[in-house]
Image (cartoon, rainbow, N blue to C red):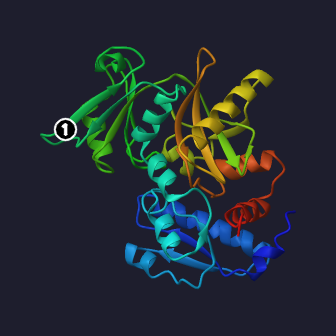
Amino acid sequence: MEDYSFLKDKKIAVLAGGWSAEREISLKSGLAVSGALEELQVNYNFIDLQSKTDAENISSEIELVFIALHGRGGEDGYIQRMLEDKGIMYTGSNPESCDIAMDKSETKKIWRDLLLPTPDFVEIKKAGTPSMKLTPYLSKEEDITALDKTFVVKPSREGSSFGISIVKPGEGSLEEAMKEALKFDDTLLVEAFVPGRELTVSILGEKVLYPIHIKPSGSFYDFKSKYESNKTEYLKADLNNTELKEIQDIAWHAFSSIGCEDWGRVDFIQDEQGNFQIIEVNTVPGLTETSLYPKAASFEGISFADLVCKILLLACKGS
């Protein structure tokens, strides 16, 4: 167990809820973190943020915040900037990194520039309007028909698989998929579908944890598979030493290249040729009983309470 005596003298708050589509999940994460702090006998205040006004009214007397806010307001740099302005320490990445990571298109552009592996994609800005702008980011000079086999349509700035559709030949349409994604954002990402297995790599401090293989209950790891199904399986990924080093190296570069730090998760597809393709970064991963991040920690022998403690201590480094 980590020495957490340092935390007992701090005025700690757990921020949860928020005003994004992920509010209910955030409340579950916040309650889980609260339970861990109670187990550690660390005093804290649980704050359910329901609006930006609530965020603005956070007391400057608080010294340390565990951010359990998912989606907009929690992972886009907003709450991080608010806390920095008040001089309050907080868990996770800085505002600028969160802002980038929240935008899947912008993140993938950086990875492309760094030659990190990520599926081909087309960014659609101001989707559904007369001024709609479509920009392909393809590995070689082709038009959007490079994605005409099977592709994934998703809102660029949303999490927890909200608004995501897979469009296959003769099954579903781009128009309907765009309408679904537009419920959450007017910047859309149309990404080449990569057949393979879903893997995720969690990062804690400077340690890259062992990858998890996700076997979803449905055709892909959608909202239902994540939060409602008891048939989704989470397994220690079956990787040889070379593959393990490769995916952990890519995960670290994907995470650090956009300035992320302390804790987070990088999601991958391992394609049918064995190559790893980066899908996205999560700067405030879920911490519910079915969440991937605590599962990865448990595979490393880290209890949930110890994990919460480690994340809080990382937020205090240099203080």
Instruction: Classify 294 as above or below 83.
Output: above
Q: Is residue 223 left or right of residue 294?
A: left
Choose between 233 and 247: the one closer to the eye. Answer: 247
Kindly identify the residue that appears in the image at 47 percent across and 66 percent down. 81
**Residue most toward the left?**
130
> As shown in the figure, which amino acid type bears the numbered disc 1?
Met
Kindly identify the residue that appears in the image at 80 percent across and 57 percent down. 303
Q: Is residue 289 left or right of residue 74?
A: right
Residue at which label 1 appears? 132
At label 1, counting other C-alpha atoms closer than 10 Å, the crowd grade (few under 14, some 14-19, many 20 or more) is few
Q: Quadrant of the C terminus?
A: bottom right
**Residue 141: quarter of image:** top left
Q: Is residue 146 left or right of residue 204?
A: left
SS category of the residue bearing label 1: loop
x and y, in percent, of residue 39 in the image: 79, 73
x and y, in percent, of residue 275 in the image: 61, 20
Q: Is residue 149 visible?
A: yes
Choose between 101 and 299: the one closer to the eye. Answer: 101
Q: Quadrant of the N terminus?
A: bottom right
Kindly identify the residue that appears in the image at 65 percent across and 53 percent down. 263
Instruction: Classify 76 as above or below 87.
Output: above
Number of marks drawn: 1
Q: Is residue 72 left or right of residue 311?
A: left
Q: Is residue 290 visible?
A: no
Kindly identify the residue that appears in the image at 72 percent across and 81 percent down. 43
**Residue most toward the front?**
318
Instruction: Classify 300 as above or below 272.
Output: below
x and y, in percent, of residue 40 in the image: 80, 73
x and y, in percent, of residue 280 in the image: 51, 39
